[in-house]
Image (tube, rainbow, N blue to C red):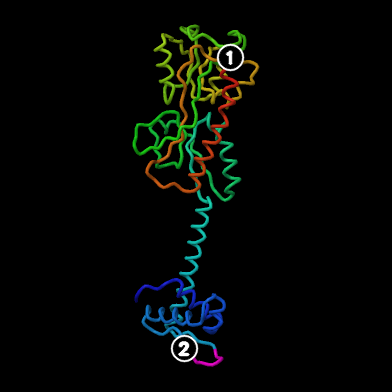
Amino acid sequence: MTDVELRHLMTLTAVVDEGSFGRAASRLGYTQSTISQHIAALERAVDGRVFDRPGGPRRVQLTPLGQVVHTHAAELLAKADSLRAAVDGFKAGEGRLTIGTFQSVSSTLLPVLVRRLLDEFPQCEIRLSEEEDEFDSPDLSRVDLLFYDLRIDDADVEHIKLLDDPYLLVAPRGHFPDGPVELAELDGAPMVAWPPDCAQPALEEALAGSGIHPQVVFRASSNEAVLSMTRAGLGSAILPWLAVHGAGATSDETLSIHALRPAVAHRELYLLRRAHRTHSPLAARAAELTAEIARDLVPRQALVTRR
């Protein structure tokens, strides 16, 4: 049997349903000669007649071979319709999107991104992965997009720069006068800090490079835990703006937020995805929206970093 075309199977089904080549032609928008050509091509493909043609007003009838072909034609056409619907849905942004994230992104950029994606693509499924230990050496094969605060030295990773995330000093209210705090005041001072992973080592190296060696008295990976220890008076904390903003610390009356003078080199926030790959319409749109949302945050940064 040679290759059978779906359009010929559609014609076969229409002839069976309508009972004649003429009515099938009207239903499909073809000429009757085109219907005859399709059936002839199908009969060549299966090497046998699929219809008995009694002539006159009587309905055409399937041959035994035609009955076999018609049974499988229905299955194939249903699968083709399912494939067409799946392709159309994929192009319209349906499907699953897996995003790797971390806490300060999850409380700032991410809620806006998810809301806008669901507004545009109500049928999409968004999954989040927020296990930061897995992202010390990020595996992009497990996610479509990954928020990250370091550049990865890998030609197979595409970096989309989202924003510079300046560091701020968070202290118990009244510990420092209002306004910027001189970096030198932090040398030997008690400090609450993140564990030494991701961008934290770069921060501590920058401080050391300026001759500043705070006394780290407590480390916690949770932003809220760091801030709680700061409220309790264990020490100050140096956190990026996004973490401070996401935790609501700027409106916390028990804490004060200060710019550092001179400023410490900022953290850089990226959206990572696999390079040299074709991304789904949903993933591509998510990357576009993320960049827009990050740009909208920049003016809000300025309001705090001038303090």
Magenta span contains residue 44: no
Front one among 157 and 295: 295
Q: Residues within 10 Å of mark 1 (few under 14, many from 20)?
A: few
The residue lying at 52 percent from left, 25 percent from top is: 222
State whether residue 293 is above or below residue 300. below
Task: Indicate the quadrant containing the C terminus: top left, top right, bottom left or bottom right.
Answer: top right
Q: Going from the N terminus, do you reach mark 1 or mark 2 first? A: 2
State whether residue 293 is above or below residue 37. above
The residue lying at 54 percent from left, 47 percent from top is: 125
User: x and y percent of residue 302 in the render?
Assistant: 57, 22
Q: Quadrant of residue 300?
A: top right
Of tags 1 and 2, the one toward the viewer is: 2
Residue that carries the numbered disc 1 in the rendered image: 232
Residue that carries the numbered disc 2 in the rendered image: 52
As drawn, the label of residue 91 is none
Give the extent of the magenta segment. Answer: 52-58
Magenta span contains residue 55: yes
Q: Is residue 247 left or right of residue 284?
A: right
User: x and y percent of residue 279 in the render?
Assistant: 44, 46
> Circle 1 sits in a helix, a strand or a loop, which is it?
loop
Label 2 is placed on what type of residue?
Asp
Front one among 96 and 177: 177
Judged by its main secondary structure, the magenta piece is loop
The residue lying at 41 percent from left, 85 percent from top is: 49
